[in-house]
Image (tube, helix red, strand yellow):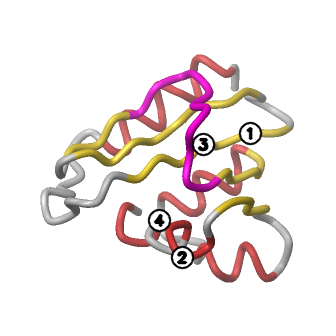
């Protein structure tokens, strides 16, 4: 899978996601390693979700993982806390805000 294909797949997985209840502004950067390597960010703003294939300088948390782990998280085949515990997901930044990722997934 190329980086571009990964971004399309991520956006497709979230296109119908309702996060209108989330009013807090959150920005997560994802650094993908291995196949599909690259970075993108997920922004929650005014109950809307934005996914862009760029880095974001003022993020709340940075997640680093493989594309395989990312899609297991998205499909709920892997819990984010378990992924972190077993070192499949690295988290840098505000851990309190990072935990809100579960609400987006």
Q: In the displayed image of the protein, which residue is found farthest to the left?
A: 20
Name the residue beneath numbered marker 3: 29
Residue annotated with mark 1: 32
Viewer-nearest of discs 3 and 2: 2
> For numbered disc 1, what is the local secondary structure?
strand
Q: Residue at x 18, y 52 (%)?
A: 47
* Residue 101 - label: 4
First in sequence: mark 3 or mark 2? 3
Q: Which residue is mark 2?
A: 96
Q: Residues within 10 Å of mark 4 (few under 14, many from 20)?
A: some
The quadrant of the image that shows the C terminus is bottom left
Identify the magenta region: 51-61
Which quadrant holds residue 88?
bottom right
Foreground: disc 4 or disc 2? 2
Q: Is residue 6 above or below residue 19?
A: above
Left or right: 30 as drawn, with respect to 105: right
Q: Is residue 61 above or below residue 87?
A: above
Residue 52, how many percent across, how many down?
A: 46, 26
Magenta highlight on residue 57: yes
**Residue 72 falls in which quadrant of the image?**
bottom right
| Image location of residue 64, percent across then percent down | 76, 50
Disc 4 vs disc 3: Cβ atoms closer than 8 Å?
no
Label 1 CA crowd tier, 10 Å (few <14, some 14–19, many 20+) = many
Q: Is residue 9 above or below residue 23?
A: above
Residues at marks 1 and 4 touching, judged by CB atoms closer than 8 Å = no
Query: Of 57 and 73, which appears nearest the observer?
Result: 57
The answer to which of 72 and 62 lies nearer the viewer is: 62
Q: Which residue lies at the image location 76% right of the left edge and 52% below the top edge?
A: 65
Q: CA distance from mark 3 to mark 1?
A: 10 Å
Label located before the other in sequence (1 or 2): 1
User: Closer to the N terminus: mark 4 or mark 2?
Assistant: 2
Left or right: where 48 falls relative to 43: left
């Amino acid at each position: 899978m190329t980086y571009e294909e990964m971004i399309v797949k991520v956006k497709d997985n979230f296109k119908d996601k309702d996060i209108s209840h989330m009013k807090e502004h959150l920005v997560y950067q994802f650094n993908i390693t291995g196949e599909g390597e690259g970075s993108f960010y997920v922004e929650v703003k005014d109950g809307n979700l934005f996914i862009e294939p760029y880095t974001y300088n003022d993020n709340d948390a940075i997640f680093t993982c493989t594309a395989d782990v990312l899609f297991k998280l998205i499909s709920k085949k892997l819990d984010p806390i378990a992924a972190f515990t077993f070192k499949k997901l690295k988290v840098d930044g505000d851990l309190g805000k990072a935990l809100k990722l579960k609400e987006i997934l």
